[in-house]
Each structure stands twice: as structure tokens, then as C-alpha cells.
């Protein structure tokens, strides 16, 4: 995780400065996922990096709601020699979802999110979904939203552990489902 140090409006876009330990691994122009949104590192230093967000990124994601002090999930891109632990995540956010309910379930936490119907069509029970950059398994889905069960490791290492009802989260649906749909359309 990292922390937002500064948010500067630039027209319809934004410039974020993020403080994090992984900044030493970044070079100018490198990709880094910030709460699931693939951004380009600008001016990486020893303790922080900046990233520019276009109006499109602000419109489609929850990053426009960030304020100094907010925690964000960070992830460096997968290297082709690395193991794929989860599903293929691009950082190309499809839209936002809203946390509707949070309930403890033993050591885990059940989280329910509402999402637009245009995105729910790609979400299936026991399928994969990416919420704020975290690859998760869907435990239930209906016409209004979906649920997932977060284990203690996920709760401790991501911002989802602090998720409360009403919070918006970035949603990336399974890209394979989107490609299959396009291929089978007349």
C-alpha cells in the first residue's frame, strides 16, 4: 500500500503524488497500478512518485475522490517470468462499484458491492473480479451486485480491510469474458 501525499487538479484531469516504499523500483515511464488503475510513473524518487490522470481515468475510476492521506493499493506489473497468482488483470478499470455491506464471517469478512448491470453481466459466481486492483473470487452474484469473502491476508495488506458501506471502489471485470462476448456477437 501507499499513501496519497498530494492531489493537484489539472483541467479535467489530476496529478497525484503517492508515497510508498516501492518507488525505488520505478523509473520514469514505468507502469504502476494505483488501486487497480494502471498509471504511468512520473518523477519517481526515493519515497514518492507522481502520476498524471486524464479526464477519462478520473471519469471511469474512483481516483478522482482521493485526498491527501488516503491509502491506496499499489502493484508493479507482472514480469513474463513470474507466476500468475490470480487472474489476468490489466489495470484498465471498467467502472466503479459501491460497497453496500460488510459482515464478519469468522476470520474472513464478507463484502457486498453494487455494480452497474453493464458490468454485472461479466461477473459470475466463483469467477474472478478485480476490486481496487485486488484479484478476488466472487462468492455470489445477482441482478444488483456481487459478494466476495476477504481472508485475513487480504484484509491486512490492502485497502479493502478498511472498506465501509458507501465507499466507491474501482472495478475491472474479467477481460476474457469481454473478448468472448465480442467474438460470438454477429
Image (spheres, rainbow, N blue to C red):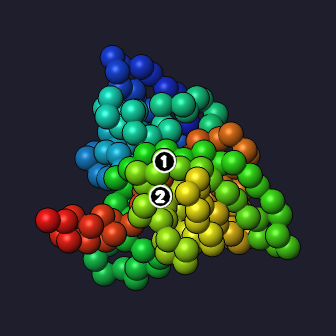
On screen, residue 71 versus residue 8, left or right, reads right
Mark 2 crowdedness (10 Å alpha carbons): few <14, some 14-19, many ≥20:
some
Q: Which residue in the protein does label 2 denote?
A: 120
Residue 137 location, quadrant: bottom right
**Residue at (58%, 65%) from the top-left corner?**
141
SS at mark 1?
loop
Q: Nearer the viewer, residue 48 or 64?
A: 64
Q: Position of residue 65 (x, y in %)?
A: 54, 31
Q: Residue at x 42, y 19 (%)?
A: 9
Between 119 and 72, the residue placed more toward the observer is 119
81 displayed left or right of 48: left
Relative to 24, is 148 above or below? below
In percent of width and height, residue 14 lies at 39, 27
Q: Quadrant of the rendered structure where residue 12 is? A: top left
Within the image, what quadrant is residue 173 found in? bottom left
Please identify the quadrant where the C terminus is shown.
bottom left
User: Are circles 1 and 2 on residues that touch, CB within 8 Å?
Assistant: yes
How far separated are the C-alphas under marks 1 and 2? Answer: 6 Å
> Is any part of residue 146 visible from this angle?
yes
As drawn, the residue found furthest toward the front would be 186
Q: Residue at x 57, y 70 (%)?
A: 138
Identify the residue position indicated by label 1 in the image. Answer: 116
Image point 64% across, 34% down: which residue?
69
Which circle marks residue 182 in the picture? none
Amino acid at each position: 500500500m501507499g499513501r496519497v501525499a498530494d492531489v493537484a487538479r489539472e483541467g479535467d484531469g489530476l496529478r497525484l503524488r503517492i508515497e510508498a516504499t516501492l518507488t525505488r523500483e520505478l523509473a520514469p515511464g514505468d507502469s504502476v497500478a494505483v488501486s487497480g488503475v494502471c498509471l504511468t510513473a512520473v518523477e519517481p524518487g526515493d519515497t514518492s512518485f507522481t502520476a498524471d490522470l486524464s479526464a477519462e481515468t478520473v471519469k471511469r475510476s474512483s481516483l478522482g475522490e482521493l485526498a491527501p492521506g488516503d491509502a491506496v493499493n499499489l502493484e508493479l506489473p507482472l514480469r513474463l517470468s513470474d507466476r500468475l497468482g490470480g487472474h489476468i488483470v490489466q489495470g484498465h478499470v471498467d467502472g466503479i462499484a459501491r460497497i453496500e455491506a460488510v459482515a464478519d464471517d469468522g476470520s474472513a469478512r464478507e463484502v457486498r458491492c453494487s455494480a452497474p448491470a453493464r458490468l454485472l453481466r461479466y461477473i459470475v459466481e466463483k469467477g474472478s473480479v478485480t476490486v481496487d486492483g485486488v484479484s478476488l473470487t466472487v462468492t455470489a452474484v445477482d441482478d444488483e451486485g456481487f459478494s466476495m469473502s476477504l481472508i485475513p491476508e487480504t484484509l491486512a495488506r490492502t485497502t479493502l480491510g478498511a472498506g465501509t458501506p458507501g465507499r466507491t471502489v474501482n472495478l475491472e471485470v474479467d477481460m476474457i469474458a469481454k473478448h468472448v462476448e465480442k467474438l460470438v456477437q454477429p
